[in-house]
């Protein structure tokens, strides 16, 4: 009978859970309710947990406190999409519940599961049952029941928790009709189950390859860093490790600045901060630069430098120099009172945002949700006292909110824009002469009047919103569901617009994507103008992937 686990075992279980999720991510992606080519729940959750797993895997002999710090901070910064943010909050709550113990028994674990669920529910403004939250709550409820009845055998404890959570997952379609109609269970809940099942296999002693492979995401800062880390042994010659004995508090901004500096001189970076010490690992061609920077924060100890590729050192140094030049930051923008960050995909839409005065555009959207770390990096680049963030996608709002709570030296306001047209409307309605509070209210109110439709294609047969959809069909998706579908893109788009229109709408904006010609888009514009002669109809190149057209009516 095994009654307790220590930090070493918890570390193995966490890495095994991450590995299992990574292996199942494509299967989880396919559980997306809407049959669109952007089901990315599995990818988002994998990128979230891998951000923490990379820090955990670099630890040789983790103690519980440092391990919990790595899991919590790594997943919080790496969180992508709603499912990833909720997963990071579950880890945050769980680690708060176990970080002060050297060994964990059933009672401590049950308390930690309760704390995990409580933390995750608080992070979501309007929690919805039938999701990952419901599955987590079910698992925590079973853990509490087992602990209260005196179950001490962790083999039985974990097995029963997983079995019951699986039963809850199977019932999610009964709680969300849209899941039942699509014939799938909740994808986020399934992702959580794969983490738990992988962790349990490690607990049972199953031999697991803990090597972490690269996970592809958007061409964002995080994914670029992950790609670089996978090739670190090729580019950088010295493996450098040390501990900083802090002489003062090491806040979030200082930690981010230090990581950014290390990224400019090397890769394969792990920075794990505790209350008074910081563990550092970096592959670089100039260990002295890392050491000099670290000395600004305190005294150093446990220093270790290994030459990994001596015979190619000169070549590697030249490569690193080139990389540093390519990654050099532009000159800092002039200080201003208010700045804007927008998330969008498509060179045309990005140019529209920049033309409206947005200071920084994060490339992302469907299929490539930026992480909390990407948001924090963007905020750092905008030299303003107050920064508005426009997520422009409902699956990015939570990551933006999470970032807003992690910034200390600026006021961050997230306008909950769910679509690109809402983001454009928000920026247009910003009035410099008004106060921040007045502009927040105005923008938040104005985006409510925008109706949005997007045209894409179906990746599988399904029945949803009382519509039978075949693989390859075009679909017009509105704010609350599928408005039209069929085999003719023009007809599907036009019927979608007809469904969007209301008597008070005066402006129709059409943004055509990278796979639509200007001529074809022009034909659609002419047809819409003929149908709605009293409306202004604007046609603009968006260049967005996945969606042939994005249309707004306001």
Image (cartoon, rainbow, N blue to C red):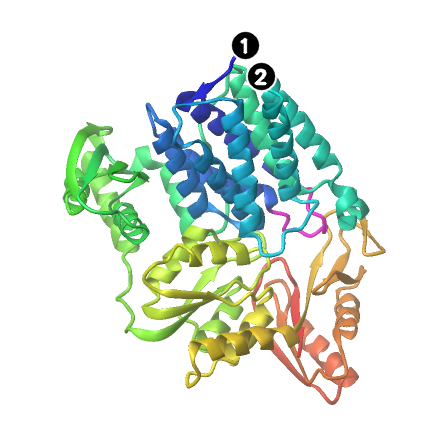
Which residue is nearer to you in this view: 364 or 140?
140
Relative horizontal placement of residue 56, taking residue 187 as reference (left or right)? left
Query: Residue at horizontal 40%, vertical 68%?
Result: 387
Q: Find residue 470 and report its horizontal and vertical position in percent.
A: 81, 51
Percent x, y for residue 398?
53, 55
Tell me residue 210's x, y (percent). 46, 25
The disc label shown at residue 1, or none: 1
Indicate the quadrant where residue 327 lies.
bottom left
Q: Is residue 340 above or below residue 63?
A: below
* Residue 491 visible somewhere in the drawing: yes
Nearest the eye: 396 or 548: 396
- Of the numbered discs 2 and 1, the one sitting upstream in the chain is 1
Q: Which residue is mark 2?
A: 155
Q: Is residue 337 left or right of residue 437?
A: left
36 is within the stretch colored magenta: yes
Quarter assignment of residue 10 = top left
Q: Residue most toward the bottom?
A: 534
Q: Is residue 350 above or below residue 269?
A: below
Residue 244 located within the stretch drawn in magenta: no
Q: Residue at x 49, y 22 (%)?
A: 105
Local SS, label 2: helix
Q: Secondary structure at mark 1?
A: loop
Residue at figure coordinates x 53%, y 51% from the top left: 123
- Which stretch appears magenta? 30-40
Q: Is there a contact, CB below 8 Å, between mark 2 and mark 1? A: yes
Q: Identify whether 143 is placed above or below 260.
A: above
């Amino acid at each position: 009978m095994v009654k307790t686990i220590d930090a070493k075992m918890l570390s193995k279980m966490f890495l095994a859970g991450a590995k299992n999720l990574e292996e199942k991510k494509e299967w989880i992606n396919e559980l997306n309710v809407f049959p669109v080519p952007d089901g990315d729940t599995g990818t988002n959750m994998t990128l979230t947990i891998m951000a923490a797993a990379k820090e955990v895997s670099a630890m040789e002999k983790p103690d519980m406190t440092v391990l919990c710090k790595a899991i919590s901070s790594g997943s919080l910064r790496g969180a992508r999409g709603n499912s990833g943010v909720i997963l990071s909050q579950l880890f945050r709550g769980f680690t708060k519940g176990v970080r002060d113990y050297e060994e964990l028994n059933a009672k401590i674990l049950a308390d930690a599961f309760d704390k995990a669920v409580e933390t995750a529910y608080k992070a979501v403004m309007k929690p919805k049952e039938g999701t990952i939250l419901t599955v987590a709550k079910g698992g925590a409820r079973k853990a509490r029941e087992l602990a209260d009845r005196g179950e001490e055998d962790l083999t039985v404890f974990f097995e029963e928790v997983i079995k019951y959570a699986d039963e809850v997952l199977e019932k999610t379609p009964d709680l969300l009709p849209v899941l039942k109609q699509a014939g799938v269970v909740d994808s986020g809940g399934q992702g959580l189950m794969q983490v738990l099942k992988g962790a349990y296999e490690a607990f049972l002693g199953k031999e697991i390859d803990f090597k972490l492979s690269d996970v592809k995401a958007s061409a964002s800062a995080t994914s670029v860093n992950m790609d670089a880390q996978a090739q670190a042994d090729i580019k950088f010659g010295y493996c450098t490790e040390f501990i900083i004995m802090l002489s003062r508090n090491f806040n979030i901004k200082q930690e981010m600045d230090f990581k950014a500096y290390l990224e400019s001189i090397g890769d394969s970076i792990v920075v794990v901060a505790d209350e008074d010490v910081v563990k550092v690992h970096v592959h670089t061609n100039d260990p002295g630069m890392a050491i000099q920077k670290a000395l600004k924060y305190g005294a150093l100890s446990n220093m270790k430098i290994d030459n990994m590729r001596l015979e190619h050192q000169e070549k590697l140094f030249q490569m690193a120099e080139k990389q540093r030049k390519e990654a050099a930051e532009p000159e800092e923008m002039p200080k201003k009172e208010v700045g804007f960050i927008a998330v969008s995909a498509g060179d045309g839409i990005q140019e529209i945002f920049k033309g409206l005065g947005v200071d920084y555009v994060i490339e992302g959207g469907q299929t490539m949700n930026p992480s909390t770390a990407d948001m924090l990096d963007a905020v750092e680049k905008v030299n303003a006292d107050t920064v508005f963030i426009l997520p422009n996608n409902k699956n990015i709002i939570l990551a933006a909110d999470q970032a807003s709570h992690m910034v200390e030296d600026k006021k961050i306001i997230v306008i909950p824009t769910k679509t690109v047209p809402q983001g454009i409307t928000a920026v247009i309605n910003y009035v410099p002469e008004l106060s921040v509070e007045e502009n927040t209210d105005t923008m938040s109110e104005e985006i409510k009047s925008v109706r949005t439709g997007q045209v894409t294609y179906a990746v599988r047969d399904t029945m949803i919103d009382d519509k039978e959809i075949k693989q390859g069909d075009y679909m017009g998706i509105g704010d609350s569901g599928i408005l039209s579908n069929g085999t003719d893109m023009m007809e599907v788009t036009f019927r979608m617009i007809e469904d969007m229109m209301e008597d008070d709408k005066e402006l129709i904006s059409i943004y055509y994507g990278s796979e639509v010609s200007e001529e074809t888009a022009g034909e659609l514009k002419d047809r819409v103008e003929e149908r709605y002669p009293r409306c202004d109809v604007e046609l603009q190149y968006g260049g967005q992937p996945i969606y042939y057209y994005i249309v707004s009516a306001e």
